[in-house]
Image (cartoon, rainbow, N blue to C red):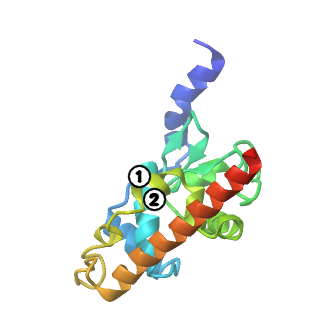
Amino acid sequence: MTAGKSYHRLGPFLLLLLGVQGRIYDHCELARELRDRHEVPINQIPTWVCIARHESGYNTSAVNHYSGDHGLFQISQLFWCSPPGQGWACGVTCAELEDDDIEDDVVCARRIFRQHQRMSGNGFTAWSVYRSRCTGVNLGEYIEGCFDGTKNKSSTPEIKRTNELVKRRFDRSFYRHNIFLKNLLQ
């Protein structure tokens, strides 16, 4: 066993000894925290919850050692956070994205979203699970029953508009990307 592999196996135990603990959210807990504590727009919450579900299983301490992604939203260490010191574009270490306080995760995820919004017209495309798991589905199911005891089904006007808007933005972004690639290859 190499030294790197032994540290890899000791990592979770070291985090426990240091008092760093993660949390696994329920989808409604996450939705309410995004709305109430982090002031995420209600029309974006179903998509953020979908991304968290498929990126980390709502686990704030999730780490993908293969890709170098960290935390609830699986933020990449290639650009956004840094393993050893103060983080790159988000100004946090990757370890800070793995605790039970998701304030820094949300701030960083929103920064990533804004950057990709400028580049592609759809900030959610920064997450690979967005296209495969969070488009063409009823996003209202991710927050159904989460707010004030009401049912937030896809038939409610706001969620229905959100689903349609997300689909239109994805279609436009996908179309522009295909045209870009076609022109690049010619």
| Residue 121 quadrant | bottom right
User: Is residue 7 positioned above or below 63 on the image?
Assistant: above
Front one among 22 and 161: 161
Q: Residue at x 49, y 48 (%)?
A: 61
Find residue 133 and report its image quarter: bottom left
Q: Is residue 77 left or right of residue 103?
A: right
Label 1: state its secondary structure: helix
Q: Label 1 to label 2, Cα distance in Å? A: 5 Å
Q: Which residue is mark 1?
A: 54
**Whether residue 33 can be seen here:** no
- Which residue is farthest bottom? 157
- From the viewer's perspective, is 130 left or right of 6? left
Where is residue 66? Give x, y as percent.
57, 33
Dividing the picture into quadrants, the one containing residue 107 is bottom right
Q: Give the amino acid type for the residue marked by disc 1 in the picture.
A: His
**Height in image: 29 above or below 59?**
below
Which secondary structure lies at badge 2? helix
Q: Who is closer to the viewer here, 163 or 12?
A: 163
**In the drawing, does residue 106 fall left or right of residue 52?**
right
Q: Which mark is residue 27?
A: none
Question: Mark number for residue 51?
Answer: 2
User: Which percent across, then down, holds residue 48?
Assistant: 46, 66
